[in-house]
Amino acid sequence: MGPLGAYAASQRLDMLTDPKLTPAGRLRAHFTFLADAIGGAPVINGCMVANFAAESSDETPLIREQIATIYGQWSTLIAANLQEAADSTGVKGIDSQASAWALLDAYEGAALRARATASPRPLQNFLQTTLPLVLSAVADPR
């Protein structure tokens, strides 16, 4: 396991399978953990996966492959939670995989902007706006 794999392992993807929490609770707990880890650091470095992704090129196929694998595993877990939430509330017609990618892309964008601005505010915005918006799409419509 290289540096990216070790970093990915430290990002607590296991939180996305915690049977003690609801699917929405898992997603909230996971993204709050990540935002707190980045935003609470003395120096805001953002997400290593996003940083490597931003710097990858045709000359770094192994890094690109690792990034694709990490993002694939992460989005699959997010999608499973979104689908479970939709199923439990009777919401039909959601594309859980597309929604997972949208959520992941928004988080990674916030992490990059947090790094660029040396501020946890983009991560707080993600937690206060984007995450609740996506979760509302799978909430009980009653």
Image (spheres, rainbow, N blue to C red):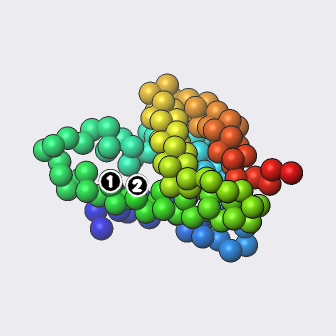
User: What amino acid is found at the position of numbered circle 1 in the picture?
Assistant: Ile
- Most foreground residue, 23 or 33: 23
- Most foreground residue, 63 or 87: 87
Q: Quadrant of the N terminus?
A: bottom left
Does residue 59 appear in the picture of this structure?
yes
> Vertically, is 47 above or below 69?
above
Asked if the residue at tag 2 contacts the one at tag 1, i.e. Cβ–Cβ closer than 8 Å, the answer is yes
For disc 1, the marked residue is 67
Residue drawn where x is 17% and y is 48% of the image: 60
- Which residue is situated farthest in the bottom direction here? 19
Q: Is residue 101 left or right of residue 27?
A: left
Residue drawn where x is 69% and y is 47% of the image: 137
Q: Is residue 24 left or right of residue 116?
A: right
Q: Is residue 52 left or right of residue 124?
A: left
Secondary structure at numbered mark 2: helix
Estimate the x, y position of residue 125 in percent, counting from the top left: 64, 33
Residue drawn where x is 32% and y is 43% of the image: 53
For disc 2, the marked residue is 71
Does residue 127 appear in the picture of this structure?
no
